[in-house]
Image: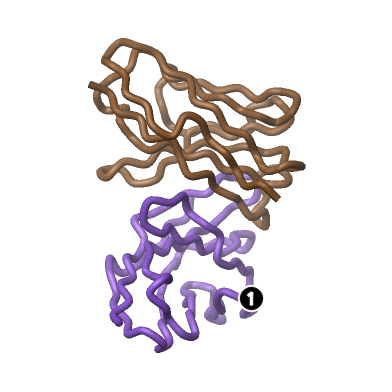
Amino acid sequence: DAKTTQPNSMESNEEEPVHLPCNHSTISGTDYIHWYRQLPSQGPEYVIHGLTSNVNNRMASLAIAEDRKSSTLILHRATLRDAAVYYCILREVGRQLTFGSGTQLTVLP
Amino acid sequence: KAGVTQTPRYLIKTRGQQVTLSCSPISGHRSVSWYQQTPGQGLQFLFEYFSETQRNKGNFPGRFSGRQFSNSRSEMNVSTLELGDSALYLCASSLETSGPYNEQFFGPGTRLTVL
């Protein structure tokens, strides 16, 4: 499975945008980029996914580099509820989710 | 729409015993995956079932097994429990097989403690 690299932790102030980076230099042409997050004492939850183009949904935006070797998850206005571990995952066709260590996001009031 | 449910939520067992965990997927979802989460190893994939067939399997010993029933409900079994099996076991369901575009919905997990 192709690997991703994320910072161990990041901090953000409440109501400010957050940019969570992810490097995936060995991504293959058929790998989708998925983001999940895990709030304290809960199972992971889906955030967003994309292949080549930037994607937006009600939770976040996903910006994908032109060469697809990196991507950035953007939370437009962080809230205290967004404090979680964020996982960037490359998902191959027919394969399971392979979680890395993720980024622990702390949101400061 | 009800989410993924897992029972029991908490379980305490002793070494050598066996345990069965249950997962009920979201209605209409046919794929069920199981993950183990520990502080040391993080989230690791155990196996995935689709239409009662195991489709993918992670790198776990044969003591870990699972099955899926015709109503898509799934169980996983761990035999001859070891202390290192203490973990949060998470179940996730999705509409289809593990295609790259299928969102997985996770349950709250079963916290297993082995003494």
Residue B11 is drawn in which quadrant?
top left
Residue at x 42% of width, y 78% of height: A79
Is A20 left or right of B15, judged from the image as shown? right
- In the rendered image, the vertical position of residue A108 relative to residue A24, given as above or below: below
Dot 1: chain letter: A
Q: Position of residue A93 (x, y in %)?
A: 65, 50
Residue at x 41% of width, y 87% of height: A15
Q: Position of residue A20 (x, y in %)?
A: 40, 76
Q: Which residue is mark 1?
A: A57
- In the rendered image, the vertical position of residue A97 relative to residue A104, given as above or below: above
Q: Position of residue B115 (x, y in %)?
A: 22, 21
Q: Position of residue A52 (x, y in %)?
A: 63, 74
| Element marked by disc 1 | loop
Is B112 or A31 nearer to us in this picture?
Answer: B112
Is A90 left or right of B12, judged from the image as shown? right
Q: Colour of chain A?
A: purple
* Mark 1, other Cα within 10 Å: few <14 / some 14–19 / many ≥20: few
Is B102 or A60 nearer to us in this picture?
Answer: A60
Is A50 left or right of A4, judged from the image as shown? right
Amino acid carrying label 1: it is Asn
Residue at x 43% of width, y 51% of height: A42
Chain that is coloured brown in the picture: B
Residue B28 is drawn in which quadrant?
top right
| Residue found at the very far bottom of the displayed protein | A16
Residue B109 is drawn in which quadrant?
top left
